[in-house]
Amino acid sequence: MTGWLAALERSARARAKAGLTRVLRPRPAGDDVVDLAGNDYLGLAVHPAVIEAAASALSAYGLGATGSRLVRGSTEAHATLESDLAEWLGAEQALVFSSGYLANLGAIRGLAASYVVSDAYNHASLIDGCKLSGAEVVVAPHADPSAVAALLDAAPGRDAVVVTESVFSVDGDLAPLAELHEVTSARGALLLVDDAHAVGVLGPSGAGAVMAAGLAGRPDVVVTATLSKSLGGAGGVVAGPAEFIRHLIDTGRTFIYDTAPPPAVVAGARAALRVARDADDRRALLASRAASAVRRLGAAGFAVTRPAAAVLSVPAPGPEAAVAWAADCRDRGIAVGCFRPPSTPDGSSRLRLTLNAGVSDRDFARALDVIVECAP
Ligand SMILES: Cc1ncc(COP(=O)(O)O)c(C=O)c1O
């Protein structure tokens, strides 16, 4: 293969021309930016109990898991986190992966469907999971149960799965989970819900949107989530019927052929889970912040999305404007997400704000002012 670097250079220039270059910016330890860009919704990444649990597992087990759990053994940290997760999410069993991305790849492939209906706004990890599954994949219009029903009806007799996020990662809206389940259960299909942005934030004791919709523990529902958002750590989880978890342990390639998440991170995530279950005050704060962001930004003339949890987005006129807007905010000490294609589901660009209960009221109010003042 000759000229491949020149070809990469040409495509880099095309991305730059379209305003789609991505830049890695340094992040100093203990930076004092106001974080409206990360996914640490409950502020637990820095909670003392979480750090203490992680530090103690770090000295007990060392830095990494040193191998897959099937090869190197399953630590108590992994096993106890899994039983706590299963109990919290109301599932029969749970299995931890080294990332939410890999949990999605493993879960969708593990369902062994021949026909997958995937929401048009699904996260990249779900899209890749659908591709990897080897099934025929059809994309359904966003959050549209009757379109999903029509697509299932068009493929009678197939082993079908419907795949959706609960709280969508860019716009922060909530999928109509109960209606989708009515559609799937009436047709003998399975429902896979990625509850990444809802676990810890929505539902009783923060048990997520699947629990809030009354679907937890159903034999035809599989839940995936990540430990990297409201639990402040890293890693992913699949929760569902015991037979399915058994199947993933025996056959799930992203479980078997991947080093387990580090025991220290897993122990920290378990401590975070325990705090999260009792964090109704933090959840209430997020809900009131979401409402005040909509009010403040709406009053300034922005068509903000209606946040179902702690994610909302603000439209930008184009990719360059979104980049400049986010950079101006950062220069004034406010970190916001800048989302451009292909990270946005509809080809438009926006700022994405993710709320963090660890941010003070004063900083949050200042952040909203700065976002308005820096608008293009
Ligand atoms: C909806 C959704 N699912 C899965 C993931 C992947 O999770 P992880 O970062 O743990 O790989 C993300 C984001 O990171 C996400 O937003």
Image (cartoon, grey):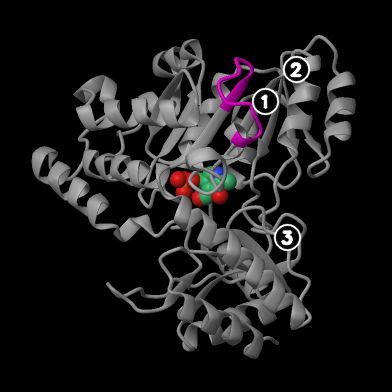
Label pair 2/3, CB-CB below 8 angstroms: no
* Residue 268 among those drawn in magenta: no
**In the picture provided, is 292 more to the left or to the right than 284?**
right
Please tell me which residue is depicted at 37% across the width and 42% down the height of the picture. 273
Considering only vertical position in the picture, is 219 above or below 177? above
Considering only vertical position in the picture, is 248 above or below 329? above
- Three-letter code, disc 1: Leu
Number of residue marks: 3
Instruction: Determine the secondary structure under disc 1.
Output: strand
- Where does residue 100 sit, x and y in percent of width and height? 47, 41
Q: Quadrant of residue 42?
A: bottom left
Residue underneath mark 1: 191
- Where does residue 344 sit, x and y in percent of width and height? 69, 59
- Where does residue 185 sit, x and y in percent of width and height? 75, 17
Residue underneath mark 2: 185
Considering only vertical position in the picture, is 245 above or below 162? above
Q: Quadrant of residue 292?
A: bottom right
* Front residue (pair 367, 101): 367
Numbered label attached to residue 181: none
- Three-letter code, disc 3: Arg
Residue underneath mark 3: 306
Instruction: Determine the secondary structure under disc 2.
Output: helix
Label pair 1/2, CB-CB below 8 angstroms: yes
Tell me which secondary structure the magenta stretch mostly adopts: loop
Q: Is mark 2 within 8 Å of ligand 1?
A: no
Closer to the chain start, of discs 1 and 3, is 1
**In the picture provided, is 100 more to the left or to the right than 133?**
left
- Three-letter code, disc 2: Ser
Instruction: Determine the secondary structure under disc 3.
Output: loop
* Front residue (pair 73, 34): 34
